[in-house]
Image (tube, helix red, strand yellow):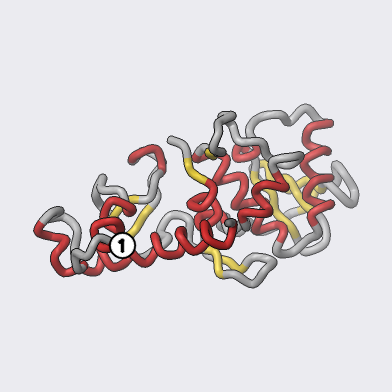
Amino acid sequence: MGFPVDLTAALTGASVWQLASWRKDLLQPEVQSNPVLYSFRDLVALRMFVRLRAEVPLQRIRKAVNTMRDWDLTQHPSRYTLLTDGDTVFLKEHDRAIDLVRRPGQEILLSVEDAFAPFTNLQGRGVVDFRHPRPHVEVEQQRLGGWPTVAGTRVAYDTIAKLVEGGIPPRDIERFYPSVTQAAASDAADFHAEVIQLRRTAA
């Protein structure tokens, strides 16, 4: 499943400009394509970087990633958990956290924050809960490759949003998709509007 730039921005909290900049040195999409598409694993890694960027300068994140490369930790970045105390960046491994920036190799004990929970990015934009970008919209990697769907269904959020855009009121969506409630249709349309807004800001 490939995620376009606007949906990637909505789910990760990265701006479209940041995504373009980070493709140069921080995270290349797993699959090279035109237009640019990100994998589900790319989204997880990007979200982690955005969360770190809300608290530490970008050069420290780059240094942390480079330190990992120097240590031959070359799996996809989504396979690692990176944390910060607001000063340095740590790699979490089981019950230990290893400093990657200030004192590379020094171990510290830290509490782990849930990288999927909502947070505020550096620009002050609220970043959605990754698993539930809206109460009735959810992201499950095993369902449609992680494409956001109406909660509890295999119906893509944008399928419903486009029906609402086309003039079908949310209350009438159940006539076409019996498993999609009015509230779910409204949430799908609302999330789609955020994705479209991010697309427009990139233009």
Q: Residue furthest right?
A: 103
Q: In the picture provided, is 57 more to the left or to the right than 139?
A: right
Tell me the kind of residue under disc 1: His
The image position of residue 164, as x and y in percent, is: 25, 63
Q: Residue furthest left?
A: 175
Q: In the picture provided, is 189 more to the left or to the right than 110?
A: left
Residue 179 lies, with reference to residue 4, above or below; the image says below
Residue at horizontal 41 percent and vertical 64 percent from the top: 193
Q: In the picture provided, is 89 more to the left or to the right than 201?
A: right
The image position of residue 40, as x and y in percent, is: 50, 40
Question: Is residue 96 something one can see in this rendering?
Answer: no
> How many numbered markers are drawn?
1
Residue at horizontal 46 percent and vertical 59 percent from the top: 195
Circle 1 Cα neighbour tier, 10 Å, few/some/many (<14 / 14–19 / ≥20) = some
Residue at horizontal 25 percent and vertical 60 percent from the top: 166
Residue 30 lies, with reference to residue 64, above or below; the image says above
Front residue (pair 180, 85)? 180
Residue 81 lies, with reference to residue 1, above or below; the image says below
Quickly name the residue at label 1. Answer: 136
Quarter holding the N terminus is top left
Q: Residue furthest bottom?
A: 124
The image position of residue 25, as x and y in percent, is: 76, 39
Residue at horizontal 61 percent and vertical 37 percent from the top: 79
Helix, strand or loop for disc 1: loop
Quarter holding the C terminus is bottom right
The image position of residue 2, as x and y in percent, is: 47, 37
Front residue (pair 63, 81)? 63
Q: Residue furthest front?
A: 203
